[in-house]
Image (cartoon, rainbow, N blue to C red):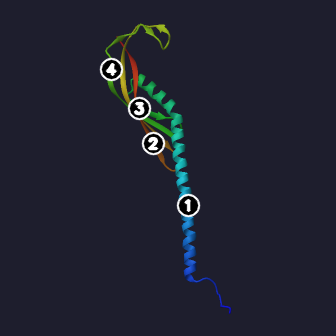
Amino acid sequence: MFRNNRGFTLVEVIVAAVIVFSAISLGYLAVRSAVSAVEKVTAHIVMADALPFIMDQVKKQLFENKPKGGGRYDQQITYSYEAKQVKSSGNMLDLYDGAIGSYEFGFYMVFLLKTHLVISYENAQNIKTAEYDYHEIVWIPIQQ
């Protein structure tokens, strides 16, 4: 009536091991893809947060007639840019300077620049980059 059971057979142990290891590997893949997605989102949020400051710095450098340059926002974010002239005006005489609210006399050149901006976010594991292309208008005083 009773059989002599001495444990599991080798086939049963191998099938159980395959099931356990498959579940572990699927769990690892799910966690790893979730961590990767969080890292990507974090990088995009940090770079988007820095973008207004960086664009302001680029604009200041363009007003200083520096068509190429870069800098650092913080320990993890660096940026570089290159601006190419699309169009420029002739010499213009400005009678009223709206930026400072007073009358000034001087000659200016107005430039439309196509700016290519690259922002890099560097953390312990890897580097994420974002590229932006936009147009910027700058005016530079001409010494007469």
**From the viewer's perspective, is the residue at label 3 or at label 2 nearer?**
2
Query: Is mark 4 in CB contact (under 8 Å) with mark 3?
Result: no
Tag 1: residue type? Tyr
- The residue singled out by tag 4 in the image is 88
- The residue singled out by tag 2 in the image is 129
Local SS, label 1 = helix
Which residue is painted at 58% across and 78% down in the image? 13
Image spot of residue 14 (x, y percent): 55, 77
Q: How far is the residue under mark 4 from the one under mark 1?
A: 57 Å
Number of other residues with Cα within 10 Å of mark 3, as a class: few under 14, some 14 to 19, many 20 or more: some
Tag 3: residue type? Gly
Q: Using the rendered view, name the quadrant where residue 11 is placed.
A: bottom right
- The residue singled out by tag 3 in the image is 69
Q: Earlier in the sequence, mark 4 or mark 3?
A: 3
Q: Earlier in the sequence, mark 2 or mark 4?
A: 4
User: Where does the C terminus fall, quadrant-wise?
Assistant: top left
Q: How far is the residue under mark 4 from the one under mark 3?
A: 21 Å
**From what the image shows, is residue 22 above or below residue 70?**
below
**From what the image shows, is residue 74 above or below residue 99?**
below
Q: Residue furthest bottom?
A: 1
Q: How far is the residue under mark 1 from the one under mark 2?
A: 27 Å
**From the viewer's perspective, is the residue at label 4 or at label 1 nearer?**
1
Q: How far is the residue under mark 3 from the one under mark 2?
A: 17 Å
Local SS, label 2 = strand
Number of other residues with Cα within 10 Å of mark 2, as a class: few under 14, some 14 to 19, many 20 or more: some
Q: Is residue 64 visible?
A: no
Mark linked to residue 101: none
